[in-house]
Image: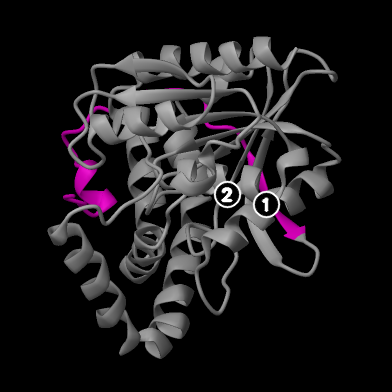
Amino acid sequence: MRVPHPRHLLTSSTSVPFVQVPPGRVVELPGRGSTFVTDTPGPSPQAQTVVLLHALGCTGLLTWFPSIPRLAQRYRVVTLDQRWHGQGIRSERFSLRDCADDVAALLDVLGVERALVAGYSMGGVVAQRVWRQHPDRVAGLVLAATSDRFQLTVAERAFFTGMGVSMLGTRGIARSRVATRAARSTARALDVDASDIQAWALREFRSTSPWAVAEALTALGRHHSRPWLGRVDAPTAVVVTNRDRVIPPARQLALARAVPGATVHDIEAGHAACVLEAEVFVPAVVEAAATVTARVR
């Protein structure tokens, strides 16, 4: 599996869709830490809430900003920066389990009993864990460009194992200097005029340090949800990116087949479709969410 650093996906020649970037705020999750959250109202106070979980090396807004306006036509739309990403919680270690617990804690703070949980790439892995750890909080799942496990080949196992070992020696330095620099970078990003979408997107990318990406990648290498996916009882839709060179489409389809009754919404797009091919991705994720919502009812 070839995993480029996210900032390589966005260059000065890349066309980034222009949409209104919603405002956000730093929210304290009691006993856990603070993170950056956006909360876009739906068409009515009774609108179903959808929580959007972002990709590796990104932020909640950077992954989902093209989708928020369309989703907000029907849902209350919430994003957050996950641990070690953007303005997410700075903890002693990165844990997918902690990321899932953070989602439940945020729902408590927002006064939301149950939500649709949608995740892109790494966010899809966290979404799986939200159901695993807090099934009563999940009304439905939308999983996009993601998988139920990694390290299926010798090359993948060597890659993830080597990444974990190589991180041990720099752990102490990274937690202080790199994490602080990343947080300051993100704060500067908030001063960017949202109309300058290209500059804003680049700064969002730079708000997550390479160390954080590597640590999260190591955690993803340990993820394996196949043993319990067959017990998922929440309505689920899977958006498959057919030209994905990071997570093979066959693996995304295998995830869909493992979840009882999951619907498949495939698109001809690559792994960065959430932003760079938004004209294809956004209609698919809206359709997937609608399919899940209909089954919830």
Residue 12 location (% of width, % of height): 19, 39
Please give left or right for residue 119 compared with residue 77 in the image. Answer: left
Residue 31: image location, x then y, percent: 78, 70
Give, as a three-letter code, the residue at label 1: Gln
Residue at 24% across / 52% down in the picture?
Answer: 152
Q: Is residue 131 above or below residue 15?
A: below
Picture quadrant of residue 166: bottom left
What residue would you read off at disc 1? 133
Answer with left or right where residue 277 lies relative to residue 69: left
Q: Quadrant of the C terminus?
A: top right
Tag of residue 129: 2
Marks 2 and 1, how far apart at CA? 6 Å
| Residue type for callout 2 | Arg
- For the point 43% across and 67% down, which residue is it? 182
Label 1: state its secondary structure.
Answer: helix
The answer to whether 258 is drawn above or below residue 89 in the figure is: above
Number of the label disc, if any, that sits on residue 286: none
Magenta: main secondary structure equals loop
Q: Does 147 sit above or below residue 159?
A: above
Relative placement, left or right, of 29 versus 230 is right
Q: Nearer the viewer, residue 182 or 244?
A: 244
In this rendering, the answer to whether 142 lies above or below 208 is above
Q: Nearer the viewer, residue 265 or 251?
A: 251
Asked whether residue 251 is in view, the answer is: yes
Q: Is residue 35 magenta?
A: no
**Mark 2–mark 1 CB contact (< 8 Å):** yes
Q: Relative to the observer, which residue lies in front, 162 or 269?
A: 162
Residues in magenta, as a range? 1-28
